[in-house]
Amino acid sequence: MPKVIDHDQRRSDIIDVTWALIVKGGLEAATMREIASEAGFANGALKHYFPGKDEIIQGTYDRALGMMSEGVATAVGDATGLAALRAIVYASAPLTEEAIVAGRVLLSFWERAMSNDDLHQAYLSHLTSWRGGLRTYIEQGRADGDIVTPTPDEQLVDEIVLINVGANVMSLIAPELSTPALLEAQLDAFFDRITTA
């Protein structure tokens, strides 16, 4: 009787290996040969589960986003307005070791996305969704009277995105200049500014 292979589990195992390689040595460490070797496959066997490296990178990126999304969803819960905005901003910031590691994977994905249109479009789709959620919570916070800054909504969205992306990069490149304590202080100052008349 032929052996039954769980393809979804195999794909998950390949992503686990790719994740570990990226965290340890960056995207350049996650060669197809290394991924296959670490996953216990013959060199060409990965093609049974992923058409190529970009699809493996996409799967690894999706896992990083999924981890972040779960954390955000748990933090936000049923909150709306300012409370939801605070929750999503702090939960998506690199304030924990897990979030910093996920940021390492995201940084590698961004590098690959610069030269791959499909990966670039995948990130733009995520960015559009993220910005839309931020905009909704800001609008709710204004309607509730909690957000009172005269700064336009779109500029606030830009600030949050730039703080988050910059913090992810700095937490990896110069962690001594972007400690969780410093980032929390910056986020606290941002929220003080937008909630004080």
Image (tube, helix red, strand yellow):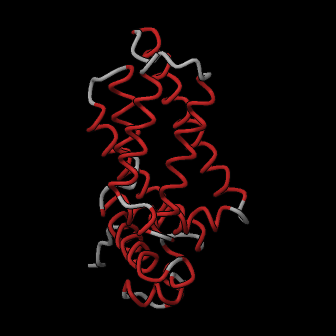
Which residue is at a point 42% across and 58% down the rendered structure image? 64
Left or right of 126 in this view: 25: left
Instruction: Answer above or below: position of 6 versus 151.
Output: below
State the quadrant of the N terminus: bottom left
Asked which quadrant contains residue 191, the reply is top left
Residue 125 lies, in percent from the top left, at 60, 42
Which residue is at a point 39% across and 87% down the rendered structure image? 38
Instruction: Answer above or below: position of 121 versus 52.
Output: above
Which residue is at a point 42% across and 75% down the rendered structure image? 23
For the residue pair 52 and 140, the one nearer the viewer reads as 140
Residue 17 lies, in percent from the top left, at 38, 77
Which residue is at a point 52% across and 47% down the rendered structure image? 163
- Residue sticking out furthest to the front: 197
Q: How many marks?
A: 0
Residue 70 lies, in percent from the top left, at 32, 45
For the residue pair 108 and 175, the one nearer the viewer reads as 175
For the residue pair 195 and 61, the one nearer the viewer reads as 195
Instruction: Answer above or below: position of 134 versus 9.
Output: above
Residue 155 lies, in percent from the top left, at 62, 30
Instruction: Answer above or below: position of 111 versus 126.
Output: below
